[in-house]
Amino acid sequence: MNRRILIILLFFPAFIVREPGYSQSRESVVMFFNTENYFDPFDDSLKLDNEFTPEGSMHWTWKRFQQKANHLYKVFMAAGEWDPPDLIGLAEVENYWVLHYLIKETPFGKFDYGIVHYESPDRRGIDVALLYRKKHVRVLSSRVVPVFFPDHPEKKTRDILSVLLVSRGDTLSCFVNHWPSRRGGYLESEPYRLQAARSLKQAVDSVRNVEPLRKILIMGDFNDEPSDSSLLLIKSKENLINFMEPMFQKKDGTLYFGRQWWMFDQFLVSKNLAESVKEVQIFRPAFLLDRDKGEIPLRTYSGMRYFGGFSDHLPVLLKLSVK
């Protein structure tokens, strides 16, 4: 080795080349993001996805799909300040293939993420998923928690994703949610979200019956706010802390609709995990915002009009201290 280079390496270790994704961070970042229809441009005859094809009403082309994937990559990188999150919960992804494309065919591939995903019965074909950074996270098991509606068996919605994992030495039961929307009105749709809450409660109960001290991490787009009955049911019955409540009390939110902010995207954690929480935030860098409309989320679509933005939701971040 050249003598000058050897001296630099010995006395200035910052010059040492690190592997991609190298980090000395003492915190673990968790993200949840509703991607606003991360669809592929191909027609699936088993799903109602025709609008998201080149010939469909959204004119969803390969170029637009690629831009969407690269937008997601940009969000993930910015959230971790070039050291992306350990865990990324996602809503409104169409299938495994779009996730595989994201972690293999964009620059995001150098960080070696794994995928936890199951096809859900949602009629439009949108699912939830969890991406995990293999360097820091090991998945032990996963399953879906179905949400059934006994009074309306014909109604279908997204399954809840349940993942048992080890993150930087900590064992967590993680649940990723996307509860039924408010389409048709709040009161008319509320029973469906209450049923989703009951399904989540049963899943958490099943974990605690086996391991009472298991740390619980719940994330998702609940289509309800912290003060609504569905979230209160989960919080009170399961003795959880909703870390979005302080921001909600200040009228902040993750979705802008009807000229107001709504706090639909949330983190709830067990008290023994709350001790490790360093920070919770709504992630709103300038590039995610439409400044012409008052710094609201820069959407991919508004109705059928294509804006080429990121999502109609803002991501939320949870930062955990690492032992």
Image: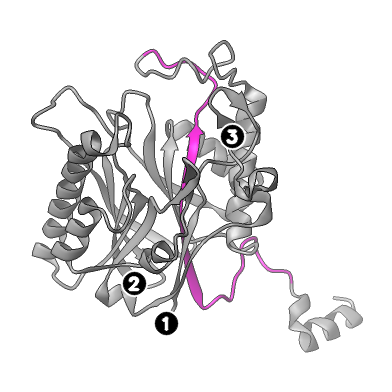
Q: Are marks 1 and 2 in contact (CB under 8 Å)?
A: yes
- Residue 224 percent coordinates (x, y): 31, 48
Viewer-nearest of discs 1 and 3:
3
Quadrant location of the N terminus in the rendered image: bottom right
Real-space Cα distance between discs 2 and 3? Answer: 36 Å
For the record, the magenta segment spans: 17-45
The residue type indicated by label 2 comes to: Asp
Of residues 212 and 319, the one drawn nearer to the viewer in this rendering:
319
The residue type indicated by label 3 comes to: Thr
Residue at position x 57%, y 30% from top? 301
Q: Secondary structure at mark 1?
A: loop
- Residue 45 percent coordinates (x, y): 39, 12
- Residue 136 percent coordinates (x, y): 46, 65
Question: From this viewpoint, is residue 199 visible?
Answer: yes
Of residues 20 and 164, the one drawn nearer to the viewer in this rendering:
164
Q: Secondary structure at mark 3?
A: loop
> Which of the numbered marks, if any, corresponds to residue 274?
none
Real-space Cα distance between discs 1 and 3? Answer: 39 Å
Q: Is residue 235 magenta?
A: no
- Describe residue 227's horizontal placement relative to residue 45 as left or right: left
Q: Residue furthest bottom?
A: 11
Real-space Cα distance between discs 1 and 2? Answer: 9 Å
Looking at the image, is mark 1 or mark 2 earlier in the sequence?
2
Residue at position x 49%, y 37% from top? 36
Quadrant location of the C terminus in the rendered image: bottom left
Residue corresponding to mark 3: 300
Residue corresponding to mark 2: 170
Of residues 175 and 114, the one drawn nearer to the viewer in this rendering:
175
- Describe residue 189's horizontal placement relative to residue 150 as left or right: right
Looking at the image, is mark 1 or mark 3 earlier in the sequence?
3
Residue at position x 33%, y 53% from top? 225
- Describe residue 316's horizontal placement relative to residue 270 as left or right: right
